[in-house]
Amino acid sequence: MNSRTESMLDLTPRPITTPSSQEPYNPCFDPLVSKRVGHAMAYAPTYWAATAGDPPPDDGPIQSDTDVDVAIIGSGFTGLAAALFLAREHGIRAVVLEANQVAWGCTSRNGGQGQNASGRLYRSQWVRRWGLDTARRLDAEIREGFETFRALVNEIDCDAQDFGHLFVAHREKTLHFLRRESRLKNELFGYQTRMIDRAQLHSEFCSEQEAHGAMYEPEGIGVHPLKLAFGYQRQARASGAKVHTASPVTEWKTRGGLHLLKTPGGIVRAKSVGIATGGYGIQGLTPLLRNRVMPILSNSMVTRPLTEDELSEVGMRHRAFLTDSRTLRFYYRLLPDNRFQIGSRSAVHGVDAQAPEHLDLLRLGLARKFPVLKDIAVAYSWWGWVDVSHDMMPRVVQPDPHQRIFYALGYGGNGVSFSAHAGRRLAQKIAGQHHPAFDLPIYNSPLPNHLFAAFRRLGQACLYRWYALRDEIL
């Protein structure tokens, strides 16, 4: 048996098993074409699910018609944080409805990188889009959001690695961009980023062979995302919220301002509804979200533990997590148990998610960066849907002032940290409170629609080819 096919059973802890699982994991689920998200479906075979331990108790499926003040759809970071802050700060006991298992979607499949960011745009792009004054206010809001995240992380055992973030220039030309971005962040927004050359990167951080240099940002916390989500769940339930798994919303009607959410076990009648489905909300959930989010697949893998010789070659002298400067970027880090995790883009369609070429892309990326890991055994491989808005920025809004419906979506792959604060702001909006930050663009306008929604996947495939050409050759 060679290293590429070494048995997973010899390498990994036993994955989560739950007696409520009724459906096997569906690796081809696609929110743009699937009619249902599942019913008590098993977790994806992620490293996080295999190492989080048994899930804490939840409230089981909805079993009868129920009247509630607030229903939250989705039990990922955002939904659980919203339920927690509704209870903790507003005295409102929300009911969270989860189709499958707690944190089954984005939250249990991401890379665990908590950056001081949200959405896909850089600070320089904020300035160009909204002007410096608004950009500075938005930056202050995102920074406050990072502190919301840090505070929750400090309350929960989630293997936190609070060592910052390295933005790696994979080509000389992108090093120039990072220098400009670092200067702008420091001079206009008061950050303390620093540029490091290739030699400094190797001597202070790690022996990343593809790098021409990097921007180091002190703000960045790597976490075990499922352990963190389980912590949110425990705190939310301890504060009075209920978390109902195996309770997909299969039909939604509104009568006299009351939302009737049909689940397999009964109808939940809610005065207010918060939507926190990330990239896993199907098109038919509500007309308010149709074509508002573009779900994008991201692939991830985790290796077996590195040997002492491999650790020496990798030269990981600092546990900051890394992303590179490709448009279709790689995100990667050494985990606390000395396994290496790396992720990047994946298939365009869910039906193609299992194609081996996507895992091969990660293997090649890892080998470029750390040649000693070229043939290392892969213990875990999975993929998940990222919620990307069409203008690359998130929204936490009440899209129709005449309906008590709210959503927090569109993080674009930067939701690990900001989802905590988005949940807090979502709770404030549901509770009817106003905050000065609510006139910022991410809070005062709905997610934009897409005029050519039927052709989005075709456009995505073409863009992937262009981005790959630009990232590697042009």
Image: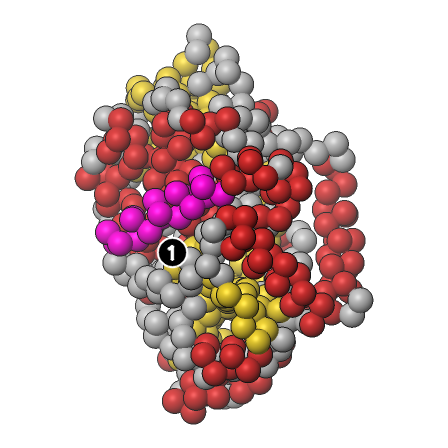
In this figure, which colouring scheme has been used for the structure? secondary structure
Q: Nearer the viewer, residue 102 or 409?
A: 409
Q: Is residue 445 above or below residue 458?
A: above
Q: Residue at x 29, y 48 (%)?
A: 152
* Amino acid on which the number 1 mark rests in the picture: Pro
Q: Is residue 351 visible?
A: yes
Residue 198: name its quadrant: bottom right
Asked whether, in this view, residue 381 is left or right of residue 297, the answer is left
Q: Nearer the viewer, residue 231 or 324?
A: 324
Label 1 secondary element: helix
Total labels drawn? 1
Residue at far top of view: 256
Q: Nearer the viewer, residue 103 or 15?
A: 103
Q: Which residue is mark 1?
A: 225
Q: Position of residue 241 (x, y in %)?
A: 26, 33
Q: Position of residue 95 (x, y in %)?
A: 31, 30
Q: Is residue 42 above or below residue 250?
A: below
Question: Would you say residue 109 sits in the magenta stretch?
Answer: no
Q: Position of residue 462 (x, y in %)?
A: 78, 53
Asked whether, in this view, residue 122 is left or right of residue 422, the answer is right
Question: Would you say residue 145 sits in the magenta stretch?
Answer: yes
Task: Count neighbours of disc 1 (C-alpha within 10 A) and say few if under 14, some if 14 to 19, many if 20 or more.
Answer: many
Q: Residue at x 80, y 67 (%)?
A: 474
Report the magenta residues as a range.
Answer: 139-156
Q: Residue at x 40, y 33 (%)?
A: 425
Q: Residue at x 44, y 18 (%)?
A: 404
Q: Is residue 344 above or below residue 384?
A: below
